Image (cartoon, helix red, strand yellow):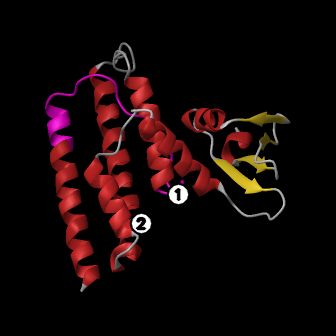
């Protein structure tokens, strides 16, 4: 378990090849995405300069998934992200995104817990085809957007009914609270 706690160190050579220091072999971006989907934290460093390239490669993984039509980010969100790099709001955007995703993960955990309590014989909700792939995309996106600040969340599978509506109301309330805090920060 101690191995899971420390990030998997990937070294980038001058040839731009990526080297997994644990298994002593070369890896691809898709391999790195797989490590992240499996719950591993990764750190990618440039062998020559020692620079941390993790953020750059995580963004590249997200961009490749988006370009293949595996879209998670709506156009208006992408537009707002680009816009945030050119405005005074840049300092508030990372905190807002991190807090929003943290609330989302908490809500998902609560929802999953309530679903497993509703289905005690199985311990979890029945599998829905394609959900795991969507969840893996969301996990990679969340980690990329929060700079790996949060833990991996495991979302529920299936439909939630009343609990889902209550959770949605809670998310809306928390989002409104965050928006109020952001407005105060802008003043």
Residue depicted at 26% across the width and 73% down the height: 182
Q: Residues within 10 Å of mark 1 (few under 14, many from 20)?
A: some
User: Does the image show residue 176?
Assistant: yes
Query: What residue would you read off at disc 1?
Result: 147
Image position, residue 60 (x, y; %): 55, 47
Residue depicted at 47% across the width and 56% down the height: 146
Disc ID at residue 15 = none
Q: Which residues are magenta?
A: 146-167
Residue depicted at 34% across the width and 32% down the height: 112
Query: What residue would you read off at disc 2?
Result: 94
Image position, residue 104 (x, y; %): 33, 48
Q: Is residue 160 magenta-colored? A: yes
Q: Camera-side residue: 180 or 110?
A: 180
Give the dominant element type of the magenta stretch: helix, strand or loop: loop
Classify 92 as above or below 5: below
| Left or right of 157 on screen, residue 152 | right
Q: Quadrant of the C terminus?
A: bottom left
Q: Is residue 157 magenta-colored? A: yes
Mark 1 vs 2, N-terminal side: 2
Determine whether label 1 and label 2 are within 8 Å by CB: yes
């Amino acid at each position: 378990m101690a191995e899971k706690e420390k990030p998997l160190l990937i070294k980038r050579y001058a040839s731009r090849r990526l080297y997994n220091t644990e298994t002593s072999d070369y890896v691809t971006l898709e391999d790195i995405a797989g490590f992240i989907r499996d719950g591993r934290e990764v750190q990618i460093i440039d062998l020559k300069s020692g620079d941390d390239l993790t953020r750059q490669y995580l963004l590249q993984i997200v961009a490749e998934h988006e370009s293949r039509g595996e879209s998670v980010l709506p156009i208006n969100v992408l537009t707002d992200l680009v816009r945030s790099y050119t405005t005074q709001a840049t300092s508030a955007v990372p905190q807002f995104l991190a807090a929003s995703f943290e609330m989302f993960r908490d809500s998902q955990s609560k929802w999953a817990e309530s679903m497993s309590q509703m289905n005690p014989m199985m311990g979890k909700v029945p599998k829905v085809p394609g959900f795991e792939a969507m969840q893996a995309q969301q996990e990679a996106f969340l980690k990329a957007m929060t700079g790996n600040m949060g833990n991996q969340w495991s979302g529920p599978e299936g439909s939630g009914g009343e609990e889902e509506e209550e959770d949605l109301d809670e998310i809306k309330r928390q989002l409104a609270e965050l928006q109020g805090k952001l407005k105060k920060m802008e003043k």
